[in-house]
Image: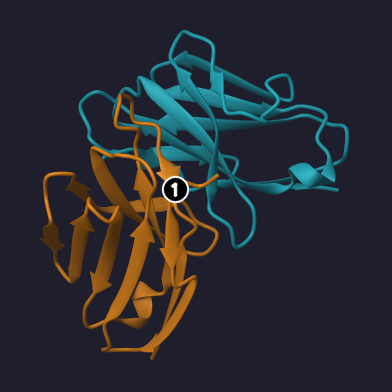
Chain colours: A cyan, B orange
């Protein structure tokens, strides 16, 4: 089956620093990758959609200058949380989709804690 | 706002019992998908039901879809402690793309 990995699985950082999270599709080429945020006991909220080689499309209310997304290849997308604040602490999940699959494949998530 | 609303928000049952979770959505859809999430983990795709289907089975899972009521249900039969997880329904837009909108989720606890 299609596998998506995320790195790191968890990260703790200080306020004001930037954190980069990687999302990789290991055995297929992902034309589209999605980034979600999930607060405790809540559902997933889509943050942005990224297509390889083009700018990401952000959902309403998501600051594109704060959450930088790069989808430089068909197997890698990165999310950089810039100038992180404690309220950015959350579980960030990516997913990948391709034209050959009906479903999205989700990464295991990254737990971000901002002190 | 969330496309889907699920009920119950939390469900606690004994092993061997059946668990039923419901999902409602607001707009027209091409398909509806159910996902499972173990605590602190990513999502696992369980089953997809298309808008022209009314019922679908996969192992101990049974999904129904009523497009007239804009609702779906997920039934897990003969539940096991390992089924303890959160279950989400998700819908892509009818127009195009694979962007998903998730329901609020049901936290299922199966007690041994």
Number of marks in picture: 1
| Among the 4 quarters of the image, the one containing residue A85 | top right
In the picture, the quarter occupied by the N terminus of chain A is top left
Q: A77 and B93: which one is in front?
A: B93
Does residue B23 appear left or right of residue A90 in this picture?
left
Q: Residue at x 86, y 48 (%)?
A: A115
Q: Residue at x 36, y 60 (%)?
A: B23
Q: A3 and A47: which one is in front?
A: A47
Residue A13 position, x and y percent, is: 80, 42
Residue B105 against residue B51 in the figure, above or below: below
* Residue for badge 1: B102
Residue B73 position, x and y percent, is: 27, 64
Q: Residue at x 38, y 18 (%)?
A: A74
Circle 1 packing at 10 Å, graded few (<14), some (14-19), many (20+), is many
Residue A101 position, x and y percent, is: 22, 32
Residue B12 against residue A7 in the figure, above or below: below
Residue B18 against residue A54 in the figure, above or below: below
Does residue B6 appear left or right of residue A39 in this picture?
left
- Label 1 sits on a secondary structure element that is strand
- In this view, the residue farthest toward the top is A53
Residue B86 position, x and y percent, is: 45, 65
| Among the 4 quarters of the image, the one containing residue B19 | bottom left
| Chain of the residue under the numbered disc 1 shown in the image | B
């Amino acid at each position: 089956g299609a596998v998506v990995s995320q790195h790191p699985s968890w990260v703790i950082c200080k306020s004001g620093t930037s954190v980069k999270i990687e999302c990789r599709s290991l055995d297929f080429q992902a034309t589209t990758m999605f980034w979600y945020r999930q607060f405790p006991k809540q559902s997933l909220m889509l943050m942005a959609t990224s297509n390889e080689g083009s700018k990401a499309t952000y959902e309403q209310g998501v600051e594109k200058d704060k959450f930088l997304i790069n989808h430089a290849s068909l197997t890698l997308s990165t999310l950089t949380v810039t100038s992180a604040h404690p309220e950015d602490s959350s579980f960030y999940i990516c997913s990948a989709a391709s034209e050959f699959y009906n479903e999205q494949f989700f990464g295991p998530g990254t737990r971000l804690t901002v002190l | 706002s969330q496309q889907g609303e699920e009920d119950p928000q939390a469900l606690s049952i004994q092993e061997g019992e059946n668990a039923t979770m419901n999902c409602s959505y607001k707009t027209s859809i091409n398909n509806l998908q159910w996902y499972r999430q173990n605590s602190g983990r990513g999502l696992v795709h369980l089953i997809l039901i298309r808008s022209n289907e009314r019922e679908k089975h996969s192992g101990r899972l049974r999904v129904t879809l009523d497009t007239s009521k804009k609702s779906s249900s997920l039934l897990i039969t003969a539940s096991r402690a390992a089924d303890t997880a959160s279950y989400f329904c998700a819908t892509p837009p009818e127009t195009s793309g694979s962007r998903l909108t998730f329901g609020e989720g049901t936290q299922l606890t199966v007690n041994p």
